[in-house]
Image (tube, rainbow, N blue to C red):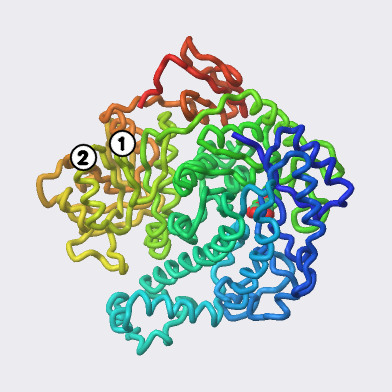
Amino acid sequence: MQAGVCYYPEHWPQSKWAQDAQRMVELGISHVRIAEFAWSRMEPEQGQYDWDWLDQAIETLAAAGLKVVLGTPTAAPPYWLITRWPEVMPLRADGTPWQFGSRRHYDMSSPDYRRECARIVSVMAERYGQHPAVVAWQTDNELGCHDTLPSYSPATRTAFQQWLAAQYGDIHALNTAWGNVFWSMEYPDFSAVSFPVNTPTDANPAHLLDFRRFLSAEVASFHGLQVEIIRKHSPGRDVFHNFMGFFGAFDHYQFAKAGLDLAAWDSYPLARTEVLALPESDKVRYARTGHPDISAFSHDLYRGVGKGRFWVMEQQAGPVNWAPWNPTPAPGVVRLWAWEAFAHGAELVSWFRWRQAPFAQEHLHSGLNLPGDGYSPGGEEAVQVGAELRQFPTVASQRGHVALVFDYETLWFTDIQRHGKTFDYQMLVFEYYQTLRQLGLDVDILPRDADFSGYALVVVPTLAVVDLALVEKVSTSQALWLFGPRTGARTRNFSIPATLPPGPLQALLPMQVIEVESLRPSLTPETTLAGQAGTAIHWRDHVRVAGDVQTLAAFADGWPALLAKGNVQYAAAWFEPKLHLAWLEQAAQSVGLVTTRLPDGVRVRRRGEITFAFNYSDTPCVLPTPQSAEWLLGSNELQQGQLCAWRESATAVQR
Ligand code: GAL
C-alpha cells in the first residue's frame, strides 16, 4: 500500500522541483506520474526533441528517492502535428472536424497518427526505459474520455470495413447475420458499409453492435501498439492504462489482453456521484462524501481487469471542476477515499494533483497544494494518510465472498436497445452491487469467462448472450447462480434466440420469455420476495414455465417473478432495492454466507485478516465489533467521513 501523486513539472519553474520532490517524500509519497500531456515540450517542432527538462525532472525526483511513472503523451498531439497531418483531427458524425485547443483531438485509426505515436513512444522509451527510477508506464490518458470515440473519418471507415471483412468473410454472411433483408438494407460489398449514424430512423442494432465491437478492438490495438514498444525498450516495468469509472465504450477485459501488468483507474467520487443516474436523494445525501459504493464498484471491477493488481492513478483530493456542481468534500473524506481503495486491494493510491494550476482549463480543480503553495485541506488529509501508511502492516487481498458478473457486450446490447427509457445496465449491476455491500459482503466483479470455482454465490444481473460454455460452467458449478431479467435474450448477432430467451440456459432452467415489457415509473407490478413485499421497476419478462421449474414468487397478476431449479435462480424483473435486499440476503444465507444488514451509509471491506469500516452517512454510528479487535485505525465509533480498521488475529474471516 503506497501513495503516489500526479505531477506536471512543465507547469512550474524548475527552481521549485527539488523542493516539491522533497515535500512529496516527507508526505510519504513513493510514486510520481509525469509527462502524459507534455508532447509539445518534448518535441516543440517536428523531429526536434527537447529532453533536457524531462531528464532533469526525472533526475530531481530520482535524487529524492521517488519512483517515476511515465505517461506517453499521445492524448495531446501538438499543434505542428495536427497541421502537418490535418486528417489526424477527428471528425464528428456530421463530418465536421473538432478544433485544436484542448486534448484528445486525434483519430486513433489514422495511420499517420499511429505512426507518430509509435515514433514518440519509441524515442521516449529508448531514452528512459532503463532508467532505474522509472518503474512503470502509462499509455496515453483515459482513452475515450470526453466522448471522443470514435472519429467518423475515412480512416475509421476503412478500418471498420476491414474488420467486418475479417469477421464475416463475405458480404452475404454479414447481410444474413445482421438481417439486412429487413428494409432492403442489403449491402453489395464491404466497401458499401458505413457508420451506423445519420440514418433517418434507428440504424440496425446489429450494425451498431458490430461498430462498438470494432471500436473496442481498435482502442485495444492503439494501446497494444504502445505496449509492444515499451516492453522492448523498458523490460521489467509495469505497463498500464488509467481507466475511468463507469465507462464502457470499450471492453476492458479485451483491452487487458492487449498488454497490461495491472489496471489503474481515476477516482473522482464526488463528480461521479453528480453525473451518475442515481436517485436525487442519494445525490443530496452523498454530495460531500460520494456515494458509498461508487468508488468501491470500480475498485472491485478493476481489480478483476488487472487480474488482482490495481492502482488508483488519480484520486480526487478536493473539489474538481467538471461535474454539474462541484462541492468540497466533507472533512475526513479525502482520507477515507484512499483507505477505501486500500481496503479493496489497491497497491497504490496516487493523488491528483500535486498542486492546483492557476491557469488553463483546470484552474478550479484542487490539488494537494494550493496554487501559491501550502497544503490544501485535502493535502492535510493526504499527510495523515502518508503517516498512517508508514505504520500500517502489509496485507494481501483475498477472494471476495460473491462473484458479480459484469459484461461489456451486455452493456452495448442493452444500450443500443434499451426498450425502456430507464433500463441502464450499469445501474442494474450497480444496484445488485450496492445490495451485496449493504449485506456486508465482499464482492469480486468478474468477466463472464472467469474461473468461478471457489465462490458459493455468483450473481449475473443480466447477460445478453448465453452460450453453451457458460451453461456447461453453471451445470458443473458448486455455486448458486442468480440471473436477472433479459438474460439470454439475444444471439451474438442481435437476434432473438430460436428457442426464445433465455436461450441455451433453458437446458438448466426450462422456461421461456414470451414477451417483455419496460415499465414507466407509474407501472409497478407487485410481488413478494423472501417475505418482502414490493414491486418491479423498469423492466419485466413475462415467463412461461416449460418444465419442472419452481416458481418461488409470482406477481399479483400471475406472472412468475422468481424461478428456480437446482443451482439456478432467475429473476424475471428488475426489482426495487428492498426486494433485491431480501432475495440476495436469503440466497447468500442459503449457501452459508454470513450477512449483516449494515447501518445506512456504512460499509465494510476485508483485506487479509483486516476489516475496514467506513461511514459515508451524516449519522454517527457505533459498529458492533469483536471484543478481541486489535485497532489499527480509529475505533468503532464513526462520525461522517471516518473510518476504522481492526484485526482479529485469532479469528478466521468468515467465508
Ligand atoms: C481526469 C484526467 C486528468 C484531469 C482530471 C481532472 O479525467 O485524466 O488529466 O483532467 O480528470 O479531474
Give the residue number, with chain letter if any, for mark 1. 454
Question: Where does the image place residue 249, in percent across and percent down from the top left?
Answer: 49, 61
Mark 1 residue's CB less than 8 Å from ligand 1 = no
Residue 567 tag number: 2
User: What is the spatial separation of the Cα atoms under label 1 and label 2, in whole angstroms?
Assistant: 15 Å
Three-letter residue code for mark 1: Gly
The residue tagged with tag 1: helix, strand or loop? Answer: loop
Left or right side of 153 for 325:
right
What residue do we see at 17% from left, 48% from top?
509
Question: Where does the image place residue 350, in percent across and percent down from the top left?
Answer: 65, 42
Three-letter residue code for mark 2: Asn
Residue 121 tag number: none
Q: Residues within 10 Å of mark 1 (few under 14, many from 20)?
A: some
Q: Are marks 1 and 2 in contact (CB under 8 Å)?
A: no
Whether residue 38 is visible here, answered yes or no, is yes
What residue do we see at 54% from left, 62% from top?
228
Furthest residue to the bottom?
188
Tell me which corner region of the image, top left, top right, bottom left or bottom right, holds residue 227: bottom right
Whether residue 281 is visible here, answered yes or no, is no
Question: Where does the image place residue 620, in percent across and percent down from the top left?
Answer: 58, 22
Q: Nearer the viewer, residue 206 or 38?
A: 38
